[in-house]
Image (cartoon, grey):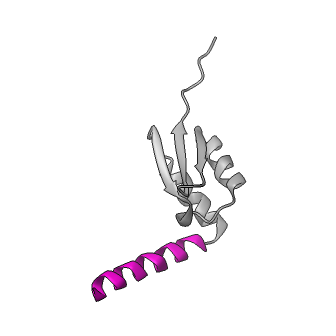
Amino acid sequence: MVGAVAAGLGMVVVRARRSVRPGEEQVRRLAESLDGRSAVYLRMAECGLARADVEQVARSRGYFVTVHPSMKYYEFRLLPPLRKV
């Protein structure tokens, strides 16, 4: 029982530390996670950036972001490359 409480507390501390990192570091970590996979999911608790910043980083990496506020996570989908006409 004590181990479960300690593990839960440890997860809360890690998430809290991640959410208060400097903005530049959070943007860098988000950009690194958008590495060409077709779908990426990120909990809002792990990202302390404003929604506009998240959307800007996603667009710059070729992703479309869907915000799921009830489930508290971001869903990133890789956009297909533009075809030349």
Residue 60's place in the image compared with 28, above or below, is above
Residue ID at (27%, 85%): 1
Magenta-colored span: 1-20
The reply to whether the magenta stretch includes residue 14 is yes
Q: Left or right: 7 with respect to 53?
A: left
Q: Residue at x 52, y 39 (%)?
A: 77
Residue at image location 60% in from the left, 23% down from the top: 82
- The answer to whether residue 36 is seen in the rendering is no
Question: Is 38 drawn above or below residue 1 in the view shown?
Answer: above
Question: Which residue is pictured at 54% across the width and 27% down the height?
Answer: 80
Residue 72 falls in image quadrant: bottom right
Image coords of residue 75 (percent x, y): 53, 46
**Residue 24: which quarter of the image?**
bottom right
Asked whether the viewer can see residue 57, the reply is yes
Dominant secondary structure (helix, strand or loop) of the stretch shown in magenta: helix
Residue most toward the bottom?
A: 2
Let me know if residue 42 is in the magenta part: no
Q: At which x and y percent is residue 85?
A: 64, 11
Q: Residue furthest top?
A: 85
Residue closer to the observer: 1 or 40: 1
Whole-percent x, y for residue 67 in the image: 60, 49
